[in-house]
Image (cartoon, rainbow, N blue to C red):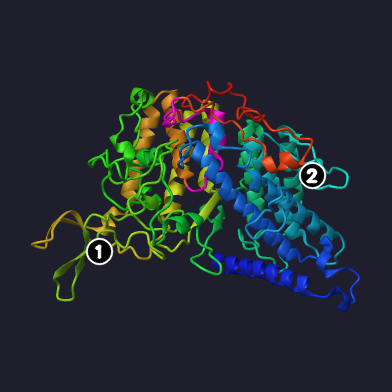
Amino acid sequence: MTTVIMKRVLKYIAIFVLVGGFLNSCETTELDLRVSPNDLSPDQADPNLLLTSIQLAYGTNQQVLSDRSGELVRIDYMGGRDYFNNYPGSTLNGVWSRVYSSGGNGVGDGVSVGILTNLQALEAIDANSEVGFAFHLGVAKTLYAHSLIQLVDFLGAAAFSQAGNPTDFPAPLLDNGQDVYNSAMGLLNEAEALLAAGPSAQGAADIFYNGDTDKWVKLINTIRLKVYYTTGNVSAFNSVISGGNYISDIEDDFQITYGTSELQPDDRHPDYAADYTPSGANIYQSNWMMETMLNNNDPRIRYYFYRQVGETPGADADPNEETLACSLVVPPQHFQDGGYTYCAVPEGYWGRTHGNDEGTPPDNFLRTAVGVYPAGGKFDADLFRNGTIQEQTDGTFDFEYNQNDDGVGLGQGAGGAGIEPIFLSSYVDFWRAYMAMNAGNTGDAATFMEAGLRKSIEKVQSFVDPNFNAGALLDSSTFDSATGVVTDPEVAGDLVPTSTDVDDFIAGLQAAFNAGDNTAKWNILAEQYFTTMYGGSTEAWTFYRLSGYPTTLVPNWEPNPGPFPRTFLLPQNEVITNPNLSQKATLTEQVFWDTNPASPTFPVAN
């Protein structure tokens, strides 16, 4: 169903282009219209297309914010040694533009104007129409409210009271973070009132919930939970939990769902499109994330990552200056002192460590690629080792040598049919665990952590690589090409985690959690929350700034990378065009809810 909806959305984008081209080609003197078709007023726009545009702008922002957050907390790889230089004023130009229609370069990604502008157009249409557009307004206000909250989380402030009114406020001032949070909560109240009666979508494409207003109300309450857990409002958090009307089941998860079309348009997961190419993979995975999962024997690892080789230079293979230059380097003292992995994770988990700014070697067919979850890639079945053994019709076995199992080429695995997680039910369980830990209820925290892990693993294991044959026999050890003798064969299905494997994994974590001191408990909770957020980690940076955990994060390659970012610089495009704004001098300004010690003493791992 979601694929169908996405196709409708892409059709609407095409309509935008066609209509724009038609209007620009018309001679206005031949048309008896009161308003020039080249200057249509907002209330003449198609409300369904406006809502589509809002969703596309919002969805693109989620990808950007997730990537930046994931880089900072080592869920994803960050490639710069100096934080300030790595995140310049241009970092959030596009995000700001897609919220406010601001910036000289436009908002891009098939979106002509931003969320607020289109929301105002919807309000004008609704006010002058006999047809009710409560659904459109409810969805738009929800996405705008969440966008404002995210701007505060990433910048510390945002425009609200003077935004969207260029006549009176051509250079809007920024409101402080607390005021923006309060205003966003007011928008959520308005959105809930609009959606409460279950209004019709009036033919609009809802790429998230397919017009299900009950699910939208659950999302609204989940955003409230996010605000309450972030600001430490225990009573309000517990009140929403008691009501039960929030994202608590996998079927209610809030996410973007991608398709498998390569061309006209390409609707595949962006990470799949980058990694599954004829020239090999192009993304480096985080060594810290892969090593953490490998050490924990995490049942999700074969879904998250697809290895192209079975050994890594400098870890369990000879160093190789050409493909992994750092494998020949003696780790710097700050890595040695902490016992951190500087360069290479074993067993072919070929990625990069936080801050590694080396050039790009010829390793596109060696580095680890994104897997079947959440990017719609391949399930890692160890097929790189030597090949597969296929049973023939006469009962004999034939070995087919296949060094890379067709690798990461176009169409491999699930073809890019992945997701961009935004708010998952598993995330909410970890918020509950966080609140329990702050209250000293470690037993409840352990229970909520288990609930989040089980939901996460269930969701991850629901992603299927259609080309993976769980019944095939694999060569798990050796193959003598001269004799054709294979030793220690195993069934591919044995690599798929069983319910017993999952139970053992969770039991091990629970035992370590219960036996550990307070710091160990926080580290386990944080590591598992970050692992659960792989692929949709916008909230990870917030958690890290709130708690300071995990303290087990690998340091930056650079011994002195500058203070850890607490917020980003203001979008440079807005600073240039808005005389009322001045750019920050550092990345150390803290969000109103971040009451921890200043950088660089906090967080500890940085």
Q: Quadrant of residue 403?
A: bottom left
Indicate yes or no whether the magenta region holds residue 175: no
Which span is picked out in magenta?
535-559
- List x then y, in percent, for residue 417: 48, 62
Compared to residue 234, the image places residue 3 above or below, namely below
Indicate yes or no whether the magenta region holds residue 541: yes
Identify the residue shown where x is 52% and y is 47%. Answer: 536
Q: Quadrant of residue 68?
A: top right
- List x then y, in percent, for residue 229: 61, 35
Disc 1 residue type (three-letter)? Ala
Task: Return the residue nearer the eye: 173 or 119.
Answer: 173
Compared to residue 145, the image places residue 606 above or below, namely above
User: Which residue was labeled with disc 2?
Assistant: 163
The quadrant in which the N terminus is found is bottom right
Q: Quadrant of residue 410?
A: bottom left
On the question of residue 428 being in view, the answer is no
Task: Return the residue nearer the eye: 425 or 603.
Answer: 603
Compared to residue 339, the image places residue 327 above or below, namely below
On the question of residue 330 being in view, the answer is yes
Q: In whole angstroms, how far apart are the C-alphas of marks 2 and 1?
A: 59 Å
User: Which residue was labeled with disc 1?
Assistant: 472
Mark 1 surroundings: few (<14), some (14-19) or many (≥20) residues within 10 A: some
Q: Nearer the viewer, mark 2 or mark 1?
A: 2
